[in-house]
Image (spheres, rainbow, N blue to C red):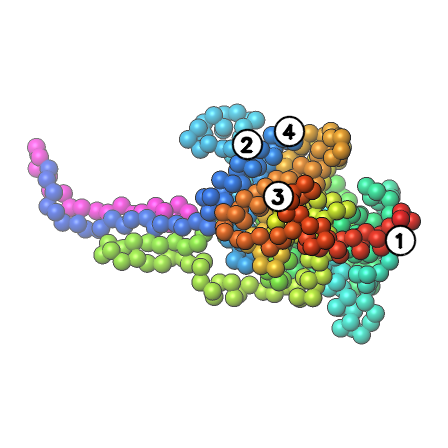
Amino acid sequence: MQCFLQGKQGKRLLMRSPRHSFETGEVITPPENGADVYLTINHCLQAIAEEELSKGVKKCKGKAGWAVIMEPRTGEILALAQYPFFYPPDYQKYFNDPNLTEHTKIKALTDANEPGSVMKPFTLATALMANDRMRDMRLAPIFDPEEMIPTANGRFPGRSKDLKDLSFHNYLNMYMALQKSTNIYMARIVERVINRLGNEWYRNVLSETFKFGQKTNLELPSESPGLLPRIGKKHPNGALEWSTPTPFSLAIGHNIQLNSIQIARAYAMLANGGYLVEPTLIRKIVKKNPDGTETLVLDHTTPSRTQKFPKMLSKPIVDEVVKAMKYVTKPGGSGQKGDIWGYTEVGKTSTAEKVVNGVYSKTQNVATFVGFTPIDNPAFVLLVTIEEPECCYIPGIGKNSRGGVATAPVFREIAMKSLEYLGIKPDDPYGYPVGDPRRDSEKAHWMQETRKLQEMYEKWNNKA
């Protein structure tokens, strides 16, 4: 932004004698003021995100954390929080200490990690796109979302170890699979996709529909493009980037690296009906002229900007994936602690193992929760990531390092306070926690559907 903020020096004619100098008043070149850059950041939402993020990182004893709030229709970044905080006036302290230098990076943009289970909604969207492709070819679809798919066997071609789920499941349909965040179901669906349409088709969807592996071009330096394996390309050690088991890893968010802005942009597609937005931090740039008039250098607020966003997913596909995501924050789901009291929401948890010295760590995780609210008219997409929450077990709650424990509550608190600040009225007046007099489990959003799904799950898996 320096090229816009920085003005230009002018030139004035000076007269000089051997002993004195004086101005003639003649201006050869008038000075030019720099332009004003108006950011998309909402200072109140930024404060909410920073406050709740710092609480969340401290509570789970994490190393660091960041949060992104994005307007899903325009791509405007409303908040970009990070903890520990970086205080620019003390820059020397940070850049002279290797341990503090890390805090100067905008980690939501510069750090690309394996996304883990937040990838699974896009695995389902890809499979639904494959269904449409098969119908276009007048062939039978890949799968049915209601289909009873076996998930007891985690063996897949090319893998030396079987895939495993946190809990054992005999059979699942699409809605159960996302609710339980199962790995085996996702890999089975992708296996059908590549068997019918091939690896090239699958990778093309990830690259060209969701733009994984490509920079978002947010107006900040040092963005990581992430990594999407390429077919036929080799690593420096000679191993292929894309091998037989690669699609099964991609299905569950492994063997791919994404930054948090890329993830938020992809979730914005689910929130806005399938359109690919361009993330931005700039609303407009205005230059003030010497005569008092203003020149609009850049304007991101015009309807013409959003009208250019391409539609990448059909409404039926978006509706199906969002429907599946509704179960995640309800009883039986992996993200129950992300349930926003009084409001409807959808979201997805993730717990990705960090790669340390080339090996997956069993004690150092990256926990994430991402979703949007309210469902019918989303105000924002919110992503929360905490790096290396303490790896321990909390009785009655679960593993502290998991996305459903470490980041889901932070998502809820940021979202709830942001909705209140924005003046958005609750759209789930009965959706409150146990003990709250406003709670009505019969009338609360998606509770009856959740009970029916649970009954079916228990019947299929002999747990009734």
Residue assigned mark 3: 412
Residue assigned mark 1: 460
Determine which quarter of the picture holds residue 133: bottom right
Residue displayed at 10% across by 37% down:
21
Residue displayed at 41% across by 57% down:
298
Circles 1 and 2 in contact, beta carbons < 8 Å = no
Label 4 SS: loop
Determine which quarter of the picture holds residue 386: top right
- Residue 82: image x %, image y %? 54, 37
Residues in magenta, as a range: 1-20
10 Å neighbourhood of mark 2: few (<14), some, or many (≥20)? some
Q: Marks 4 and 2: which is nearer the front?
A: 4
10 Å neighbourhood of mark 3: few (<14), some, or many (≥20)? many
Q: Marks 4 and 3: which is nearer the front?
A: 3
Residue assigned mark 2: 84
Amino acid type, residue under disc 2 in the picture: Pro
